[in-house]
Image (spheres, grey):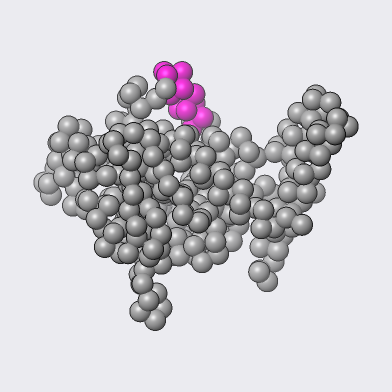
Amino acid sequence: MSNPIWSLHKLLLQLIMLEQRLIKNLFANRMINLQMFVFLGFFLVQTPIFGLPKPKVLIVMSAADTILLDENHKHPTGVFANELVHPVIALENTGIELVFATPGAKRATLDPESLKDKYWNSKEEKAEAIQFLNSNTSFQNPISLEAAVKDQNKFIAILIPGGQGLMTDLLHNKHLPLLLSSFQNQGKTIGLICHAPALLTTLPSGPKGEGFLFQGYQVNSVTKTEEWFIETFVMKGSPKVRKISELLKERGMVYESSFLPGSGYATRDRNLITSQNPFSGKEFTKLYLDAISDYLKKFSF
């Protein structure tokens, strides 16, 4: 905690928690009206306190736009749009700053499959999501993963959305184990969606031969049945790395999933939140925001 950046960050978190409690108490005691409460809430999430920056969450995305199937042909892929948009809009609405990162600072591609209407509650929701990404400066101009590693002390949490793209580049990127290990060792919130929990299998064992970093943690991810469905009816081919659930169990994690494939499901174990598929946005986002809230409470007075 001697890092000056972290000390400044901790002070900011303490100020935010104190002001939030003050406003809540004033409103509860009818000392301010609803109009003033809304104004103060807007001020809180929009204005940096005393010139300090807002808390930041690192959003790591794949930069791949194809994946090799059956070792002989490529299929279009990328970041799964709704798995990305649902939690990041919720984060932004709480006043948290979003910082997007990809390998080589390359702009991410949205998986064409994820833009089909069946993954959205309405066409209007999809249109708003695309508009949000098109207008977000950080999404359009992500930082590199190398830069994210250097700036890791600036972030309170990490979020990695799913999509087959990450099985092409993030799974083999040297910076991901560094980021995940560092965030875990500091107790920061880690959110991994659908295929993203596969990244936990890239982490080395402990420094003295102990078990893997997340050994014993309850985790969730895309199921074997869902993988089979995607490979058979969507991609019409199999990637090199598959059966993520089995890989997680081999590394000592406790795998759990929903009873029915394609239904919303997410799980939280301490600071790790994982979810199963594109239909788990509501479940994942609630658990993820709860975990960040618990993390922030550690710095309250």
Q: 1 or 136, which is in the foreground?
A: 1
Q: Main secondary structure of the magenta part?
A: helix
x and y percent of residue 119 in the render? Answer: 35, 27
Q: Quadrant of the C terminus?
A: bottom right
- Please provide the residue range marked out in magenta: 122-133
Residue at position x 81%, y 43% in the image? 22
Residue at position x 77%, y 38% in the image? 24
Residue at position x 38%, y 35% in the image? 264
x and y percent of residue 204 in the render? Answer: 35, 69
Quarter of the image where one finds residue 123: top left
Q: Is residue 78 visible?
A: no
Q: 206 or 26, which is in the foreground?
A: 26
Residue 151 within the segment the image draws in magenta: no
x and y percent of residue 292 in the render? Answer: 58, 49
x and y percent of residue 179 in the render? Answer: 46, 61
Query: In this rendering, is residue 163 above or below 15?
Result: above
